[in-house]
Image (cartoon, helix red, strand yellow):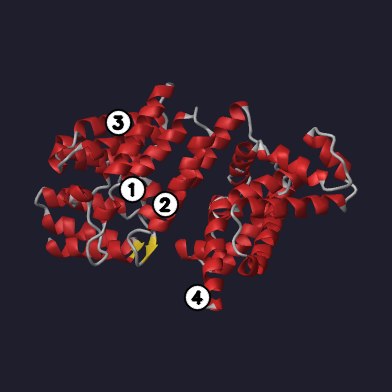
Amino acid sequence: MTVADTYGDTHGAIDAVWRIESARIIAGVARIVRDVGLAEELAQDALVAALEQWPESGVPNNPGAWLMAIAKRRAIDLIRRKETYQRKLAEMGHELEIDGDSVEDDVEAILDETIEDDLLRLVFTACHPVLTTDARVSLTLRLLGGLKTDEIGRAFLAPEATIAQRIVRAKRNLAKADVQFEVPTGDDLIQRLSSVLEVVYLIYNEGYSATAGDDWMRPALCNEAMRLGRLLAELMPGEPEVHGLLALMELQASRANARVGPNGEPVLLLDQDRRRWDRLLIRRGLESIDRAWTLGGTPGPYLLQAAIAACHARAAEADDTDWARIAGLYDVLAQVTPSPVVELNRAVAISMAFGPERGLVAVDALADEPSLKDYHLLPSVRGDLLFKLGRLDEARVEFEKAAGLTRNERERALLLDRAAAC
């Protein structure tokens, strides 16, 4: 093997380790410095040290621990140089020696016992409502996903400079608002948890149905969201909605192989070859639903959506789908989280359960809804119902309208094909 081969393999290993361990490293350091932005900088210093040393010394047996140790030592060195060192130690509630290597050893021992707490603090910090939705999504992918700014930019079709500015501004706003590196409690926990789940689901949705660009799906974003969902399920095993969201993502992701045709074209749910659905993801999703129901309480929006996805997952053929149950679940969902989009999905379920005439009545009731004015799925659904009723000229107009509203090229082509079929 040449030096170049070794160098390349080492860099690949570093990249893989960073993607897996970066969140834990940043979280562990943030517990020391109480500043997420500074913690990321110190973690990046550890990454630079690995890039400098590992090509010659080799990848250590426990690379994650190596990076964590370097980052923590950098943090401790920084605190030592500040007058606030004694106060920082007091906040941690421990009396540590200031001289000698025992400081590093003691701090690492304390932090290693609370790594899960640190990760949970990082989740709630990155998803803090003080930030805009775009900022929360970008910062979460950066800190918890280990994605680079160019990767986030490609995923959301935004310039790398825009993403970089968004992340810098987010970290600055967290510091300016004096957001504490902690897990909220009581009512604040419930409110903040909804923000966390929203961010993860936004990431997943962008991967599952890309809002713009040439690709129908972006699997990497789906996988990243599911990884974050599994992390949350480990950190918060007693929260039903966490398991509900994980179940929803896994059940929807189980269809990924069947959602795209050989040339990348979209394949609609009722036309999919269900033999291509991922049975392992279905099983895991159903297990997550069972876990959520077992925890009790009033079902939230993610668990209800997961229950709807489960109806599809359990149907071996499209004709076996229990559309009446799905319509009933949408009735409940509309009460829990009233939304025109939920009502539109409910209309689809009504049409499948009770006929396109009733579905069209439900869709037409949404015609004057301001939030759906530029929503391409409203004319798309209406066109489908008109097509089923044999009103082809009207259907064609609706499909063409929907094609003009979507920003996804694959979806536009599908809608224009449906218009032509009329």
Label 2 belongs to which residue? 223
Decide: few, some or many residues near mark 1? Use Cα within 10 Å; few <14, some 14-19, many ≥20: many
Which tag is nearer the camera, tag 4 or tag 1? Answer: 4
The answer to which image quadrant residue 192 occupies is top right
Label 1 belongs to which residue? 253
Three-letter code, disc 4: Met
**Which residue is the extreme one toward the front?**
1
Q: Is residue 156 above or below residue 360?
A: below
Tell me which numbered mark, 2 or 1, is placed earlier along the sequence: 2
Tell me which numbered mark, 4 or 1, is placed earlier along the sequence: 4
Three-letter code, disc 2: Asn
Q: Secondary structure at mark 3?
A: helix
Which tag is nearer the camera, tag 4 or tag 3? Answer: 4
Q: In the visual, does 93 lie left or right of 168?
A: right
Tell me which numbered mark, 2 or 4, is placed earlier along the sequence: 4
Q: Nearer the viewer, residue 386 or 90?
A: 90
**Residue drawn at (60%, 55%) of the image:** 63
Q: Is residue 210 above or below residue 355?
A: below
Q: Are discs 2 and 3 less than 8 Å apart at CB?
A: no
Q: Are discs 2 and 4 less than 8 Å apart at CB?
A: no
Tell me which numbered mark, 3 or 1, is placed earlier along the sequence: 1
> Considering the image in quadrants, where does the C terminus appear?
bottom left
Label 4 belongs to which residue? 1
Label 3 belongs to which residue? 329
Tell me which numbered mark, 4 or 3, is placed earlier along the sequence: 4
Three-letter code, disc 1: Ala
Q: Secondary structure at mark 4?
A: loop
